[in-house]
Image (spheres, grey):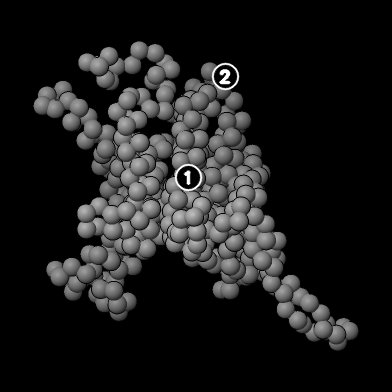
Amino acid sequence: MRLRPGLVTDYRADAGIFKSVTQRIWFGLLLAAAVFLGAGGAIGPIRISSDIMVLLAYAMFASIGALGLNIVTGMAGQVSLGHAFFLGLGAYTAAILGGVEQTRQAMDPVTGQQVTEVVLRGYGLDMIIWLPLAGIIAALAGLIVAPVATRLRGLYLAFVTLGLVFLGEHIFREARTLTGGAGNGRPTAEYRLFGFRFDQDGEVFGIWMSKQQKLFFLGLILLLVMGLAAKNLFRSRVGRALAAIRDRDIAAEMMGIPLGRYKLIAFTISSFYAGIAGALFWAVVGRLTAEGFNFLLSIKYIAMILIGGVATVSGSIMGAFFITFLPKVVEGLAGLPGLSHIISKDPAGMINTFQFEQILFGLFIVGFLILEPMGLYGIWIRVRNYWKGWPFSY
């Protein structure tokens, strides 16, 4: 077998998480490198700054949300544009259950006496309670929507899920005691677990860590857990059924696969992942606003799985990191001598960084759809296969 490293002799090996020793070694090396960099290590003169550490934590949280969207869109083939709604449900559930209640003194118009009025609801629960509940509440919402959504397909399904985004925006604006209302927003939950605060600098088991480092390791651990869970789902009986529905739903139904049941499972699990991601993603910002959970946020997550790679765990992570670091790359391009007079950080310039970022955003989506439908994961497969077959062309 050492002379035939790509040979698969049974179904169990073909469905394994790591199909070869090489994959296990690379996974271990990448994990060790992530831990090393998160602990403050440096590669030569390169040291990870706090800004990059924040972006890395953002990318890991976004990867969890992208994994959820890839389950329903990539694996089940159901086009969903309502991902922002489930992200918002998770974020506000976490903020309500893990936040602190805020009150104010007001005059009762009937009695004329001073009364205590609740401005923002909050219960101050620990992270071990509100984090899974954020996913469960979002999953319940997905379970309610799924029976309607699973009867539709294609453009009609996209429009139904798009309506969820606008419904969510209205709810988040008007439920002021829960969300803070439009423009005001509310603080995020307290990221407290077993006495440790992830949103503050401090010691963890005797080792001092910054807030950015704590969020980095929190994101790394949760991404490993959620990523391995998604990988196991993809190679399970449910994953094979979803792939059959995606490829040809009529043929899948003729083979005895209940379409409604498996589409409902896909929507529910996808919503759970979105709720977890929404509860975590705004940890660094520290404040939620109703305007943030809009249609553009759903499009960003669609771009993550399109650019990264549809129906793959690695592609979801690649796409999330790509979209998260795109603004940083644009800022770097704006500082280059040859491009500084074209791309300006000043909003009044010829093309400011935000506009150039949106242009690149659209070009990358169109480019990957036309040139490389498998996304960054497909490019990696091409490079890997080239070196595996080198110097032969077959």
Q: Which is closer to the viewer, label 2 or label 1?
A: 1
Q: CA distance from mark 2 to mark 1?
A: 38 Å
Query: Which residue is painted at 49% across and 51% down in the image?
Result: 218
> Within 10 Å of the Cα at label 1, are there few (<14), some (14-19), or many (20+) other Cα atoms?
few
Q: How many marks?
A: 2
Asked whether 90 or 201 is in front, the reply is 201
Q: Which residue is mark 1?
A: 221
Query: Which residue is painted at 59% across and 34% down in the image?
Result: 265
**Numbered disc 2: secondary structure:** loop
Query: Which residue is painted at 35% across and 30% down in the image?
Result: 24
> Within 10 Å of the Cα at label 2, are there few (<14), some (14-19), or many (20+) other Cα atoms?
few
Measured from the top left, where is residue 29 in percent x and y? 32, 38
Q: Place residue 305 in its image quadrant.
A: top left
Return the residue found at the far bottom.
112
Report the amino acid beneath label 2.
Gly
**Which quadrant is the N terminus positioned in?**
top left
Between discs 2 and 1, the one toward the N terminus: 1
Query: Which residue is painted at 22% across and 29% down in the image?
Result: 385
Vertical placement of residue 53 versus 304, above or below: below
Asked whether 286 or 112 is in front, the reply is 286
Q: Which residue is mark 2?
A: 256
Residue 195 seen by the camera:
yes
